[in-house]
Each structure stands twice: as structure tokens, then as C-alpha cells.
Image (cartoon, grey):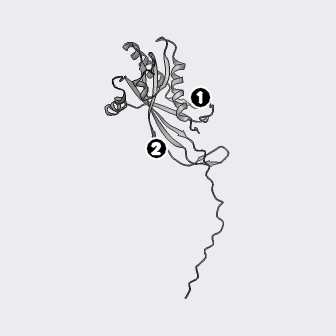
Amino acid sequence: MATVNAIAATTAAILGLLQDGYHGQFGTLTFAPAQINDFAGDKIPPDGVTLCLYHVTVNATRNRSPRVSSNGTRYRPSLPVDLQYLLTAWSSNAEKQQRVLGWALRQLEDNPILPAGLLNRPLREADVFSADEAVELAIDPLNLTDFTNVWDKVKPRIQTSVAYIARAVLIDSDIELHEGLPVHTRVFEMAKVLS
């Protein structure tokens, strides 16, 4: 299962998927992670795509039973989180920006499941996700209030963005669960009553 680097690996995998699928049809583009504060400053590429992790929530639909390793060791349950992103295309030319955004949407829609091979590739650590893990990526539309709240801090640089969610990214615990030996007999002693 995924280590504590799962969030960073997921972000890097999404950007890597876009970069690998890009063949120069819109000129040179930069694919980069971003923070909300970057949108107010000069850190945004003039032509490119950014992926901003703006919210993380615990996925409540997952079973939180203890994790069992391949050798039978039991660990505390994995923490399932949903990662909420804003995908934004940037360009000084409105038409180019819209074309890049449309292309990026198509790329991600064509690859809604991120397998472990893709998730493990971008970071130095090659074993962030186990071979049988995957992350589901889907469009997660923001209502107008949420969209305004996200962009409120960076006025007047509001950009057209698309919200995505990476569902049920499991972050594993390294704490082993130790169980006592099975109970074979029970002895109940009655207290003596003093008269």
C-alpha cells in the first residue's frame, strides 16, 4: 500500500501523464505543481498547465480494517484520502489557453485510472504504491461558492480551471498491531466475604 509520499506521487503522476501525452501541438508548455499563493505572484508559467492541490479530505466510504502485509504482519488501518485539485491552463493568448485546457481535459478523461507503475515513476522513491494499487481520477465540479472561495485570495488573477478529485489514495501506517496469545482457560476467583 502507499507510503506517506502518496500525495506527492499522485500529483507528480498526473502532471507526468499530461507531459508524456503532449506532442508539441501548442508550442512549448510547462507542466508544474502549484499552490494557491503562486497564482497571485510570478511563479505561474507563461504557457503551461498547473495542478494545484487545494483540499484534502478523508474518504469515509472505505473500510478501515487493519492492513495485513504479504508476510501476515498486521498494521493500523490505512488512511484513505481524497485529493482535490484545480487544473489550470495558462497563456497570454486566450485561444491558446482554451485549446490547451481542452487538450488537458481530454488527456485526463482518457486516463481515469492511474496504475501503480505511473504513480511510482515520477518520484525518487520507486515503491510508494504497491503493484496492485491504483488511483481513480475524475472531474469534481465546484459550485460557484466554492470556486469563489478558492480564488478569493488571488484576485484579480482568477483563471478558468477545472476541479478534479483523486479518490481513495491510501496512506499506510508503519505501526504494527500486536495481539496477545489466544485465551485457553479462564479463571474466576470469588472474593471471600468477611463476616
Residue 84 in the image, given as x and y percentages of width and height: 44, 33
Question: Residue farthest to the right?
Answer: 71
- Dot 1 alpha-carbon crowd within 10 angstroms: few under 14, some 14 to 19, many 20 or more: some
Residue 53 in the image, given as x and y percentages of width and height: 46, 31
Mark earlier in primary sequence (2, 1)? 2
Q: Nearer the viewer, residue 62 or 42?
A: 42
Question: Residue farthest to the front?
Answer: 41
- Give the position of the N terminus as an image quadrant: top right
- Dot 2 alpha-carbon crowd within 10 angstroms: few under 14, some 14 to 19, many 20 or more: few
Q: Amino acid at mark 1?
A: Leu
* Residue 18 numbered mark, or none: none
Q: Secondary structure at mark 1?
A: loop
In the picture shown, does residue 20 fall above or below 168? Answer: above
Q: Which residue is mark 1?
A: 123
Q: Which residue is mark 2?
A: 61
Q: Residue at x 48, y 15 (%)?
A: 29
In the visual, does 152 lie left or right of 85? left
Residue 129 in the image, given as x and y percentages of width and height: 59, 35
Q: Residue at x 66, y 43 (%)?
A: 70
Q: Nearer the viewer, residue 30 or 72?
A: 30
Q: Residue at x 43, y 25 (%)?
A: 38
Answer yes or no: do the residues labelled 2 and 1 have beta carbons within 8 Å? Answer: no
In the picture shown, does residue 62 fall above or below 123? Answer: below
Inter-mark Cα distance, 2 to 1? 28 Å
Q: Nearer the viewer, residue 124 or 104?
A: 124
Q: Secondary structure at mark 2?
A: loop
Tell me the quarter of the picture where residue 57 sits.
top left
Question: Residue farthest to the left?
Answer: 145
Q: Amino acid at mark 2?
A: Thr
Tell me the quarter of the picture where residue 98 sits.
top left
Residue 146 in the image, given as x and y percentages of width and height: 35, 33
- Give the position of the C terminus as an image quadrant: bottom right
